[in-house]
Amino acid sequence: MSEYYKIGLLPDETTAALLIDNANLLRPHTNGYLLGDNAMAHITVCQFKAEVDQIEALQHALKELPQAMTLKTLDITVRAGTDTHLGFDWIETGIESEPDLWTLQKSVYAILKDNKCDPITDMETYSPHITYGRVASNMGDEYITSRLKDIPTNIATTLALGHSTVNGEWIKTISTF
C-alpha cells in the first residue's frame, strides 16, 4: 500500500525552534495544521506517494544530490486556501526561488519518476515556503502576520526524506543526507 512521503530541506535547529515559536503564536487561531506537535518545520522539495519497499533505492539516489543549502527567506504571507481548504488561509514564509533550489527540485522529481514513485508536488507551480499553520480566512492578514516574529534572512538547511500526511505535514524524518 502506498504511503505519503516528502523530500525536503530541514532548517537548522535554532531556526526550526523559532518557526515553531511563531506557529505557537497562531495556535488559538489554527484549524487542522500547525507546526510543532505533529508537523516538523521544513521546506518541501517534493511530496510523493511510494511503497515502503521503494524507499531504500530513493535514499541511495538522494545521497548523490547536494546535501546542504542556505536559502533566503522572504516575507510572511497569507495564502488563500483552495479545493478542500476553501474558507481557510495558509500562513507561511516564502523562500526565494533561487536556481540551485530549482535544480534540486527538478533532480528530485526525476529521481522519483526513475524509481516509479508518484510525485504530488507540481513542478510547474512549485513555490518554496515554510507553512506555519492554517487559519479561518476571516482572521485578517495584518492581524495574523503582525503577531509573528521575524526569522533569519538566511537559513541553513539539510536535505532529508520523511513521512508526511496527505495534507503535507512532515511527521517523521526517515533520513538526512
Image: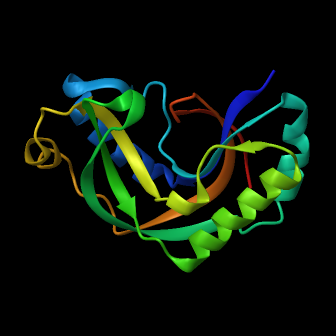
Query: Residue 49, how many percent across, how many down?
Result: 72, 35
Q: Residue furthest bottom?
A: 99
Q: Is 39 placed above or below 144 here?
A: above
Query: Residue 135, how many percent across, how many down?
Result: 25, 31
Left or right: where 76 falls relative to 37: left
Q: Is residue 34 visible?
A: no
Left or right: where 51 falls relative to 144: right
Left or right: where 40 falls relative to 31: right
Q: Is residue 158 visible?
A: yes
In which quadrant of the rendered view does residue 133 lie? top left
Q: Is 90 placed above or below 164 here?
A: below
Q: Is 49 placed above or below 160 here?
A: above
**Residue drawn where x is 35% and y is 41% of the image:** 132
Query: Residue 116, how many percent across, how many down?
Result: 86, 45
**Residue drawn where x is 10% and y is 40% of the image:** 140
- The count of marks equals 0
